[in-house]
Image (cartoon, helix red, strand yellow):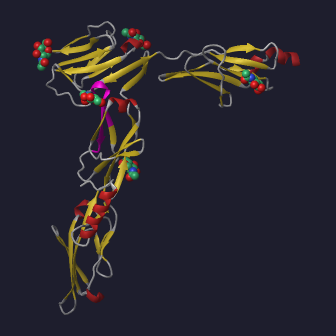
Amino acid sequence: MSCQYNLLFLFLCGFAALSVSTETRGKDLLEGTSYIIKLTTRNNEKPSEIKWIHDTRGHVLRWKGGKIREISEGVSMEEDGSLKFSSVSLKDTGKYTFNAYNDAGAEIGKGEVEIKVYEKAPKPAVKIICTKNGNATLTCVIGKREDLTLSWYKEDKMIQNENKLQVFLSSTEVQENKPYSCEAHNPVSSNKSDSVTVSCNEMKAVGDEVSFQLDKIVPPSVTNITWKHINSVRTVKAIEWEDRDTTIPNPIFKGITTLDTATGQITITNLTVEHSGVYTIDINGKEQEQRFTLTVMERVPKPAIKIKKMTDNPGVVYLICEYSETIIWRNSAGETLTGSKPIHPKGEFINVTKGGNPEIFYTCTLQNTVSEETSDPVYERDLFKGEMLDGH
Ligand SMILES: *[C@@H]1O[C@H](CO)[C@@H](O)[C@H](O)[C@H]1NC(C)=O
Ligand SMILES: *[C@@H]1O[C@H](CO)[C@@H](O)[C@H](O)[C@H]1NC(C)=O
Ligand SMILES: *[C@@H]1O[C@H](CO)[C@@H](O)[C@H](O)[C@H]1NC(C)=O
Ligand SMILES: *[C@@H]1O[C@H](CO)[C@@H](O)[C@H](O)[C@H]1NC(C)=O
Ligand SMILES: *[C@@H]1O[C@H](CO)[C@@H](O)[C@H](O)[C@H]1NC(C)=O
């Protein structure tokens, strides 16, 4: 029953639990914790005989005439006859009944208590599978555990009414690049997966290597595997394995593409921008749902700082770094400096005032999604060389 996240349900479930708790609903315990099942007697009379019985294992404890006659491992008896577990384990789950008698053999206490012991919830993991039309399926990987229920989170906000192992995301949701996580819980513990940012686009730099592999196992009976590459203008075979023969018909994949026929994994090395696109796999002639999107970008070049001296102010120079994307300026103390847009169409500049410390230097770093390059440092001693000599 899904009782969790709805106020109305919470109320109903709380009510249901309350109304049965005195009888059949047991106490939920975390494996490894200690627990005492209370023994109660009429008028708190002191018993002279006590029996604790488990519904399937029989006698857990027998005490009579001031002596323990029978006792199971891991339990002990409290002063008042209560049953103590030093560390509960899964096998302790069940109904416990007790009987207490006085010297005259009259029953002075009787009761039944149920306990249910749970393992700690394991830490789940979120697996992303990208499918047709940019859609994706997220799976919460928890292993074989039947005591667990699941919740899904998008950016730390719970997605209502999703307690399934899988969540389906439309292409629009995939493109939001939002982090998702799932949480496994049982009545006594919970654990949340790391957040994964859903993206169905693998970003690589020119020269890098990429591998794609189906999420499911390729059966050993498979004899034919074809990887196809689709871009906006055409579909070509990237690599094909048919009746033990591997062929790479298209020149852009020759010499750089390999296929692991046991797993179906394709690997492409020495990537170029041309390899961008969607990759699909056919197994024994059947196209698989899972797809892979690759974007290969040029690496940023190593920048060189240009120096511009002011004719009217010899105490200030401009450092210029030309690039159309992200530029980060730093000084020798590691501080980030804010650059300004120059009159040039692209790039940024900072201005450096003669500060009298010739060891200070400046660098400029270019960054894109796949790479980063930093210029050689420019030292203040080189910027104001002439002036410093003049000063001597
Ligand atoms: C979740 O599981 C991990 C690994 O099993 C563990 O290290 C972590 O302490 C757990 N977190 C909680 C809240 O139980
Ligand atoms: C992908 O999602 C769109 C709507 O977001 C849906 O129309 C389409 O059928 C889905 N495709 C697959 C293969 O599930
Ligand atoms: C791929 O790149 C490596 C290292 O850069 C180079 O040695 C090799 O010749 C390249 N192979 C092809 C087929 O371009
Ligand atoms: C594998 O490819 C060969 C050659 O095209 C074809 O004759 C055979 O039927 C294919 N086998 C399967 C299982 O698709
Ligand atoms: C250059 O630096 C000086 C002194 O720090 C400052 O007053 C001036 O506004 C700066 N000029 C520009 C264009 O940033």
> Residue 193 versus residue 361: which sits nearer the camera?
193
Among the 4 quarters of the image, the one containing residue 171: top left
Please state the horizontal and vertical placement of residue 15, each as a whole percent of the image. Answer: 28, 66
Residue 136 drawn in magenta: yes
Task: Identify the magenta region.
Answer: 127-142
User: From the viewer's perspective, is 109 left or right of 124?
Assistant: left
Q: Quadrant of the C terminus?
A: top right
Q: Residue at x 79, y 18 (%)?
A: 384
Among the 4 quarters of the image, the one containing residue 202: top left
Residue 251 drawn in magenta: no
- Above or below 245: residue 87: below
Q: Quadrant of the N terminus?
A: bottom left
Please state the horizontal and vertical placement of residue 56, each as a whole percent of the image. Answer: 15, 67
In the rendered image, the residue lying farthest to the bottom is 104
- Above or below 283: residue 40: below
Please state the horizontal and vertical placement of residue 220, each as a whole percent of the image. Answer: 16, 26
Q: Residue at x 27, y 25 (%)?
A: 132
- Above or below 26: residue 382: above
Say if residue 259 shows up in the picture: yes
- Above or below 9: residue 160: above
Say if residue 130 shows up in the picture: no
Prevailing secondary structure of the magenta residues:
strand
> Residue 255 versus residue 13: which sits nearer the camera?
13
